[in-house]
Image (cartoon, rainbow, N blue to C red):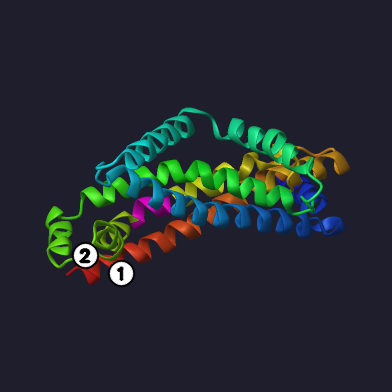
Amino acid sequence: MSAFFENLWRDFDDCFLSYDYYMLYLKGLRNTMIIAVLASLIGLLIGIITTGIRIAPKNNKIMKVLDGIARLYVTIIRGTPVVLQLFIGYFVIFATMKSFTFFEVKETAGIWVAALVFGINSGAYMSEVLRGGINAVDKGQMEAGRSLGLSWTATFFRIVLPQALKSAIPTMFNEFITLVKETSVAGYVGIIDLMKIQKYITTQNAKLYVPLFIIAIIYLVIVLILQRIQKILERRFARSER
């Protein structure tokens, strides 16, 4: 048994401590969290816009066209794998942008592209989450705002949306946790995220399973921390509603 733990420690040292490999894990973790946070913010913005369009009164042709576009967007994004969307965004759209002389390619460009792609993906799911939150808001809130002379848009953003966001926060936090795990495919397009670190370290020392377990533990710790934050927020909002 002691020999097993000695070998395990030696493998851990070779894959985490030696040659400052832990700095690579930190770099991958940093890029993963940057992508996840930016994508969640982009997704929230897109989700709010998409939800607003879908529930807004369709009293003119422009709103009908926008509603059709919003529905098509949600259908396409939710109906295709996120890794396929990442490939299209990076190898097709981003590659086309690089052909223009005014587009400056930087080392961090891949991170921004991944954040945008994951944000667009998250926006489709976030819009459904927000629609559920809006449906939970008393319809009288909208009627009350309109009776005070506010426009539909003002009533939506000032009265309805804040209440919907409050009720949807637990589900939105679940979406963020899912987003953190989904970014693990970013390494497929050359972005140095946590999963990409495994390939580099395995190439250096020919050890496969230890880097994978280290990365799994890092993801698990992140998710547990986020779940703890989510529970704290849920308790605070529950107390505020009493």
Decide if residue 149 is on the left or right side of residue 16: left
Question: Which numbered mark, 2 or 1, is in the foreground of this view?
Answer: 2
Direction from residue 110 to residue 134 in the image, left or right: left
Q: Along the horizontal axis of the image, is 92 left or right of 63?
A: right
Q: Is residue 184 above or below residue 232?
A: above
- The answer to which quarter of the image holds residue 199 is top right
Q: Nearer the viewer, residue 69 or 130?
A: 69
* Secondary structure category for the residue under label 1: helix
Q: Closest to the observer: 155 or 132? A: 155
Residue at the spot x=79%, y=47% of the render?
Answer: 11
**Within 10 Å of the Cα at label 1, are there few (<14), some (14-19), or many (20+) other Cα atoms?**
few
Which residue is identified by label 1? 236
Label 2 Cα neighbours within 10 Å, binned few <14 / some 14-19 / many ≥20: some
Near-viewer residue (69 or 111): 69
Residues 78 and 187: in front is 78
172 within the magenta span: yes
